[in-house]
Image (cartoon, helix red, strand yellow):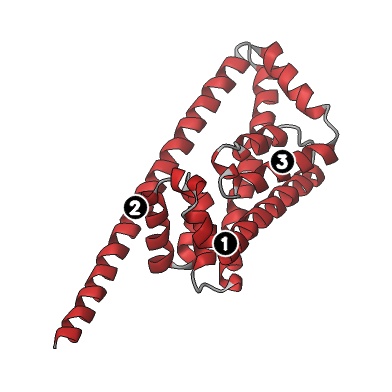
Amino acid sequence: MTELIDWLISTVQSVDPLLRNLIAGLAIMLETSLFVGLVIPGDTVVIVASTAVSNWFDFGWLLGAVLLGSLIGESLGFLIGRLFGEKIRFSRLGQKLGESNWQLADTFVETRGGLAVGISRFLPVLHSLVPVTAGMTRMKYKVFIRWTVAACAIWASAYVGVGYAARGAYEQLAGSLKFGSLIFVAIAVALTVLIHFAKKRLERKAEQLIAEGEVARASVAGGQESETEV
């Protein structure tokens, strides 16, 4: 086990830092883009790349590349929505994403505005649809990018930090304990499970906010109908 982990880490470290950062930034840019973002495991690429970070200088460069890639991807999604939103949504490929998912993104953005943009960065499917949906609304880009910067900074710092800390923990455990590599794997699995449930909890919170938004929108629509009848 130790030999395998050592080989994986050394393989990642053997990649030129500039190329490694470029790959990580490109992967996360594609992950935050419509359609492509549903199949590109950008978070996995970032964590793997961060295991090769050797000092705070490398950490800062990788963090900057990931953050820049995230902002470019999100901004491209917003631009696509602003220019081609309806065509994209009702295209054959757009409909494969499911009309229900588009409607969720619609309600989330319309009722929660920038907060929806921030939360969506941490959610599957919605992280690709919300930027496009936001571009289709009257939301100003400066509002969109303000929430995007905040969310992407938290996301990028967390993932790069996890990979960097994981490698450091492994080196300490493997060097001081006989079964250090097994303990490290157990910790990694536990951390993966923790992240999974954290995302699930955030998904439930987003679903709650969306449901509340739907109720509020229905209430407003009902009130307008009543005024019209009067």
Q: Is residue 167 above or below residue 66?
A: above
Q: Secondary structure at mark 2?
A: helix
Q: Secondary structure at mark 1?
A: helix
Say whether marks 1 and 3 touch (CB < 8 Å): no
Q: Specify the label residue 24 is tagged with.
A: 3
Say whether marks 1 and 2 touch (CB < 8 Å): no
* Pointer 3 local density, CA inside 10 Å: few below 14, some 14–19, many at least 20: many
In three-dimensional space, the C-alpha distance between marks 1 and 3, rounded to whole angstroms, equals 28 Å
Nearest the camera: 182 or 147?
A: 147
Is residue 51 in view? yes
Q: Which residue is mark 2?
A: 207
Horizontal side, residue 153 vs residue 122: left or right: right
**Residue mark closest to the camera, 1 vs 2:** 1
Given the image, on which type of amino acid does mark 2 rest? Glu
Q: Which residue is mark 1?
A: 84
Query: Could you tell me which residue is drawn at 47 percent across and 50 percent down?
Result: 126
Residue 77's spot in the image, x, y percent?
59, 57
Q: Residue furthest bottom?
A: 230
* Pointer 2 local density, CA inside 10 Å: few below 14, some 14–19, many at least 20: some
Q: Secondary structure at mark 3?
A: helix
Residue 221's spot in the image, x, y percent?
25, 74
Q: Is residue 113 above or below residue 171?
A: below
Q: Specify the label residue 44 is tagged with.
A: none
Query: Could you tell me which residue is drawn at 60 percent across and 39 percent down?
Result: 43
Query: Could you tell me which residue is drawn at 64 percent across and 58 percent down?
Result: 76
Nearest the camera: 51 or 121?
A: 121
Given the image, on which type of amino acid does mark 1 rest? Phe
Query: Could you tell me which residue is drawn at 72 percent across and 44 percent down?
Result: 26
Residue 30's spot in the image, x, y percent?
65, 45
Nearest the camera: 162 or 201?
A: 201
Is residue 149 in view? no
**Residue mark closest to the camera, 1 vs 3:** 1
